[in-house]
Amino acid sequence: MARRRTPIQRKLRTREHVVADLAVNHVERQVLLCGHTVERVTHDYGIDLAPITYNAAGEVENGLVLLQVKGTERARPLARQEAVSFRVERADLRAWLTELLPVILVVYDVAGEVAYWVHVQGHFQALPDFNLFEAGRTVTVRVPTTQVLGPATVRQFAVLRDRAYARYHQT
């Protein structure tokens, strides 16, 4: 009697993969629409993208902003619609908070085709009672729904970068 072979399972592209790609694509598009470029980080350890900005003359500007992009099927705003909450790993947060360059967390809502962002270091500096050492394995970040990612937002990221460089050069 011949033995029946079971088919070998192929790798699967899950909905989670699609959502992640849609999120990164949305952010890349916003950067490109304002005339800048973006580098994808191939070995992702908590950072996905690094936009490269250019001045009005088309000259590259020094420095980087680091973006972590997260996608979700449907972002659910909190009670008064002021923010969406997103859980991040404590290890990622530790890395982001000790980074000299600005780190931006972007949460992309697939259903609404909209992305919200928060400057991680600035957000946590404004929380006087937050203690990373007392945090659990994950930390909930409230990303303001008023901070919608669009082409003009990339200029705001460049301002954050320039401020970080100015602080560095003052020391």
Image (spheres, rainbow, N blue to C red):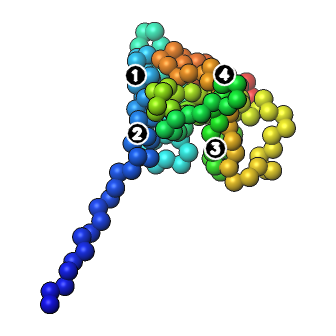
Q: Nearer the viewer, mark 3 or mark 4?
A: 3
Q: Which of marks 4 and 2 is in front?
A: 2
Q: Which of marks 3 and 1 is nearer the N terminus?
A: 1
In the rendered image, residue 79, in percent from the top left (x then y), is placed at 70, 29
Badge 2 amino acid: Asp
Which residue does the numbered mark 2 point to in the structure image? 21
Q: How crowded is mark 1: few (under 14 residues within 10 Å), some or many (20 or more)?
A: some
Q: Do the residues labelled 4 and 2 touch (CB within 8 Å)?
A: no
Residue at point 40%, 18% (across, down): 33
Which residue does the numbered mark 1 point to in the structure image? 32
Q: Earlier in the sequence, mark 3 or mark 2?
A: 2
Badge 3 amino acid: Arg
Q: In the depicted view, which residue is nearer to us: 69 or 103? A: 69
Q: Which of marks 4 and 2 is nearer the N terminus?
A: 2
Q: Residues within 10 Å of mark 3 (few under 14, many from 20)?
A: few
Tell me the SS state at disc 2.
helix
Residue at point 50%, 32% (across, down): 109
Q: Earlier in the sequence, mark 3 or mark 4?
A: 3
Quadrant where the C terminus lies?
top right
In the rendered image, residue 123, in percent from the top left (x then y), is placed at 71, 30
Alpha carbons under labels 3 and 1: distance apart: 28 Å
